[in-house]
Image (spheres, rainbow, N blue to C red):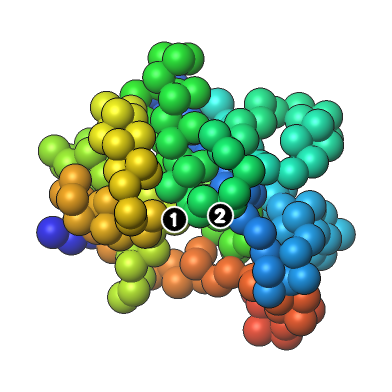
Amino acid sequence: MTMTAGMSNHRLDERLNSLLGVVLCGGRATRMGGIDKGLADFQGKPLVSYGITALSDCGQIVINANRHQTTYQKRFNLPVVDDDNKHFAGPLAGMLVALRYAAEHGFAWIITVPCDAPLVTPDYVQTMWQAAKHSHDKILMAHDGFRQPVFALLHVSLTTALESFLQGPHKKIVVFYQQMGFQTVDCSHHPQWFVNLNTMADLTTPQVLSQFD
């Protein structure tokens, strides 16, 4: 099922106190030579800072990181949660620890962004949240003509199911979403949100930089 969530040009004043924002920085970044991608410089700021700004309407923000946790915590003054193991098990592992944190701190939902999408804005959060208000699904995934599984809302009631899933043979996000059932949210009017930077060359790609002009 797909839902189109219309948004006005101004940001809503509502502070989403039941929503925990999560910036996913736990990957290997092999196409960037194995650097910690969230700390890579883009336009004079670390990539993770763009995700933090995009999630600024959430009740709280956490960073999922498997390296340089102290650096993240001190530099951004935010809680840092790392995966259960250091095997870089993929985004679902980061979502799991974020869901646990959310449950422990009284949040009903988490909303995720990857650390390598500098063009995402706070309207992403509002778009997804408005869709959730009219949905009975526990997973809402953004799409812009393509599924964007790391741009998602997940309800904390999924924690146990995700723990069980990750103990099995599958680690792919979409497989978990299909097992649980999900709704897609039409974000096709904002394809720039999903431009992600995967290589060192991407950090100076003219097509990306032009959108900052």
First along the sequence among labels 1 and 2: 2
Residue displayed at 18% across by 50% down? 179
Q: Residues within 10 Å of mark 2 (few under 14, many from 20)?
A: many
State the quadrant of the C terminus.
bottom right
- Look at the picture and state if 46 lies above or below 132: below
Residue underneath mark 2: 114
Instruction: Give residue 184's position: percent from left, percent from top.
Output: 24, 58
Residue displayed at 76% across by 30% down? 73
Q: Nearer the viewer, residue 204 or 176?
A: 176
- Residue lying at the far right of the rendered structure: 44
Q: Residues within 10 Å of mark 1 (few under 14, many from 20)?
A: many
Q: Is residue 103 visible?
A: yes
Residue underneath mark 1: 150
Q: Nearer the viewer, residue 209 or 92?
A: 92
Answer left or right for 157 relative to 96.
left
Labels 1 & 2 near each other (Cβ < 8 A): yes
For residue 187, which quarter of the picture? bottom left
